[in-house]
Image (cartoon, rainbow, N blue to C red):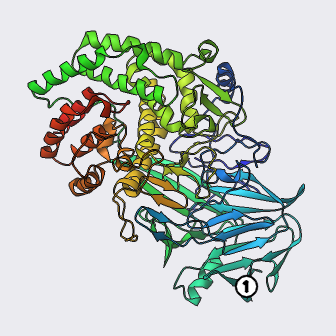
């Protein structure tokens, strides 16, 4: 589901995974849909008042980090979006609504079709200034947004000049005038021709690229005179487009884009089904428009032209239609390893190791920050699960007591008033939860899904089968879940804070203060987060949370497989690596934020290897696993950061590789086992895949 957020109102839309919803935006109206429309009606599924009471019980942060925002009154601040750089920071940043780039200028805006190039470690498609409009503006703000599009309001002083709508998966830059005005294009409009629908079409040539222009205004050279409500729509003309094709593209681009609706659904079963997304591209005239799927997403229901745009993920087809349909294979959530095939010797080894690892767990084993503390809970929860599977009741009961004590602190609504750490407070400016011992910029809303995923995963393991623990923890953990993935927008949280349904993955930077757009480094921690969300939904009895988690899990895993762990890099022969570990709006890097070690790019895409990871990380098969490991550990020495996860990954290649990995894992130095892992879980993982 999707809701169009507008200034002055916070709309509520249902989260049921099988309902299609209609949306309204600036200048738009809710309407009924034909057979190819994504519309409908729904009722709110979140008890907003109860949610607000729960939020109030937490208390507020002492100081927000947001600073001034370029955002219309009444909108929930959009963190972790592809366009967040337009809202936060000293000046608007370039944004990358695939397949184009767009940025604010001193007097209007400029757009471009990025020129894609590849070096050894980077596939680059940065912002370019090819075409744009001088509006006489001196400021902008975001006045509306939904899950795929954003509306930027252009002002001169307090006067609203007009609005530009941009969207993921659309090549259109749609400007609509608020009042009668004259605007100036960056170059003369060539071949201006009157169309039968009252529009004028032409082209602008700039910086080696031709852009199509469709306007309701009067064109004279580079000047365009617009009436109130008049529009200018710009789009890049694909390479090799013939005159007839350009006319067809111009006809499809004639009506300005107004918003993008979203619906999600599922088919089949959890093990043999699909999680589906439908993105409906709405225009002022309610007709077909230009739609650009990512490579690998498919073109079902679209009429494609045979033309393509070069993008950082490959050549993307240029299509005409109203709805982009995306399907990802369902991936059943799992947090339990299958130990049924262990030999008696393996079981004895594992029993001894679990006892040894459990003996080292104490109150000092748990960190206070939301990332480190979450990983610590996750590590011990997995150890507890192994103890229960191995019938080590004494070990399991001791670990459970310690975990309950720790999670009690994190889920105490008044916890911040007691300890000041291991607790959440609410940022009423940005509308979200913040762990009160920030880490990795979590107070700037960075990486919230990574952090919260560990907590939700641990809580699901410990509370499984306990109604008492579910009842005690659910008030706060429901807020933790809503902070990263609220099924709808409320006064307290945005809809789906971090997830981008077009990109099929999450964005990790809260405020996105970067010229290359937003980014995400650890696809695996994102997958783990949605696995934890799904499992918490199952354990807590929330079918809506479980369904939402299923959808997020399947799509994030599909993106991780396609774009990160086993990407098609044939269009980029200059790129010399097998894993793309840091994905941005405007580039893709074989790099990490924290280490130049060759093991880091692969390792950060495997951590923390929950049981569900076996369902997608090895999709490239034995050959791809071998290539990745040849780069990550070229000398075969796993005594490196993430060496434990690389051994677990190796075990997925074949039985013989699992046997070799197990031998190495037994002797891996303790300091090379990650803080989210134990030797017990490392050995159990490999044994379960022999």
Position of the C terminus by quadrant = top left
Please name whichever residue, 375 or 275, is drawn nearer the observer in this view of the structure.
Answer: 375
- Is the residue 6 above or below the residue 133 in the image? above
The residue lying at 43 percent from left, 40 percent from top is 525
Judge left or right: residue 506 versus residue 218: left
**Residue labelled with disc 1:** 195
- Is the residue 590 above or below the residue 182 in the image? above
Judge left or right: residue 127 versus residue 275: right
Q: Position of residue 310 (x, y in %)?
A: 49, 72
- Is the residue 423 above or below the residue 335 in the image? above
Q: Position of residue 415 (x, y in %)?
A: 59, 16
Picture quadrant where residue 121 is located? bottom left
Residue 21 visible? The answer is: yes
Judge left or right: residue 185 versus residue 286: right
Mark 1 element type? loop
The residue lying at 45 percent from left, 42 percent from top is 526
Q: Position of residue 235 (x, y in %)?
A: 64, 74
């Amino acid at each position: 589901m999707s809701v169009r957020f507008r200034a002055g109102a916070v709309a509520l839309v249902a989260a049921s995974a099988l309902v299609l919803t209609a949306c309204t935006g600036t200048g738009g109206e809710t309407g009924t849909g034909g057979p190819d429309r994504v519309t409908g009606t729904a009722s709110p599924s979140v008890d907003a008042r109860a949610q607000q009471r729960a939020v109030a019980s937490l208390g507020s942060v002492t100081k927000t980090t947001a600073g001034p925002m370029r955002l219309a009154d009444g909108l929930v601040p959009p963190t972790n979006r592809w366009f967040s750089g337009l809202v936060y920071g000293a000046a608007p940043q370039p944004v990358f609504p695939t397949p184009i780039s767009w940025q604010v200028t001193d007097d209007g805006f400029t757009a471009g079709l990025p020129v894609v190039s590849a070096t050894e470690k980077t596939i680059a498609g940065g912002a370019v200034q090819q075409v744009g409009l001088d509006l006489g503006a001196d400021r902008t703000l975001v006045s509306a947004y939904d899950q795929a599009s954003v509306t930027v309001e252009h002002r001169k002083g307090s006067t609203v000049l007009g609005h530009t709508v941009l969207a993921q998966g659309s090549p259109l830059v749609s400007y609509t005038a608020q009042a009668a005005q004259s605007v100036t294009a960056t170059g003369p409009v060539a071949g201006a021709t009157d169309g039968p629908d009252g529009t004028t079409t032409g082209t602008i040539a700039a910086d080696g690229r031709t852009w199509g222009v469709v306007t309701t205004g009067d064109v004279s050279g580079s000047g365009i005179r617009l009436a109130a409500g008049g529009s200018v729509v710009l789009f890049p003309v694909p390479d090799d487009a013939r005159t007839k094709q350009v006319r067809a593209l111009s006809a499809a681009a004639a009506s300005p884009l107004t918003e993008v609706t979203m619906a999600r659904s599922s088919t089949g079963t959890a093990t043999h089904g699909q999680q589906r997304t439908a993105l409906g591209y709405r225009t002022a005239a309610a007709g077909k428009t230009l739609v650009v799927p990512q490579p690998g997403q498919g073109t079902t229901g679209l009429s494609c032209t045979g033309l393509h745009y070069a993008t950082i993920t490959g050549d993307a087809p240029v299509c005409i239609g109203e709805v982009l349909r995306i399907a990802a294979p369902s991936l059943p959530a799992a947090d339990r390893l299958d130990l049924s095939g262990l030999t008696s010797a393996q079981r004895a080894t594992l029993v001894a190791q679990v006892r040894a690892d459990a003996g080292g767990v104490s109150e000092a084993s748990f960190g206070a920050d939301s990332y480190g503390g979450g990983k610590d809970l996750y590590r011990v929860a997995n150890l507890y699960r192994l103890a229960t599977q191995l019938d080590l009741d004494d070990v399991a009961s001791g670990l459970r007591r310690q975990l309950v004590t720790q999670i009690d602190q994190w889920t105490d609504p008044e916890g911040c008033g007691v300890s000041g750490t291991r607790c959440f407070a609410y940022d009423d400016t940005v509308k979200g939860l913040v762990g009160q011992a920030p880490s990795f910029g979590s107070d700037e809303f960075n990486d919230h899904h990574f952090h919260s995923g560990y907590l939700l995963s641990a809580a699901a393991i410990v509370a499984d089968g306990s109604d008492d623990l579910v009842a005690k923890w659910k008030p706060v953990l429901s807020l933790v879940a809503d902070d990263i993935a609220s099924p709808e927008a409320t006064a307290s949280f945005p809809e789906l804070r971090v997830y981008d349904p077009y990109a099929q993955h999450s964005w990790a930077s809260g405020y996105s203060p970067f010229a290359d757009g937003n980014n995400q480094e650890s696809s695996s921690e994102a997958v783990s987060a949605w696995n934890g969300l799904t499992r918490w939904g199952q354990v807590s009895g929330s079918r809506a949370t479980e369904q939402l988690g299923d959808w997020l899990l399947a799509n994030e895993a599909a993106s991780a497989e396609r774009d990160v762990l086993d990407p098609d890099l044939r269009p980029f022969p200059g790129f010399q690596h097998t894993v793309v570990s840091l994905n941005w709006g405007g580039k893709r890097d074989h790099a990490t934020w924290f280490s130049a070690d060759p093991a880091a790019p692969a390792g950060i895409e495997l951590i923390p290897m929950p049981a569900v990871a076996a369902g997608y990380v090895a999709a490239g098969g034995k050959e791809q696993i071998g290539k990745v490991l040849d780069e990550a550990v070229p000398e075969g020495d796993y005594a490196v950061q993430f060496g434990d996860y690389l051994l677990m990954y190796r075990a997925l290649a074949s039985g013989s590789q699992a046997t070799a990995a197990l031998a190495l894992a037994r002797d891996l130095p303790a300091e090379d086992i990650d803080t989210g892992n134990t030797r017990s879980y490392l050995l159990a993982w490999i044994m379960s895949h022999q």
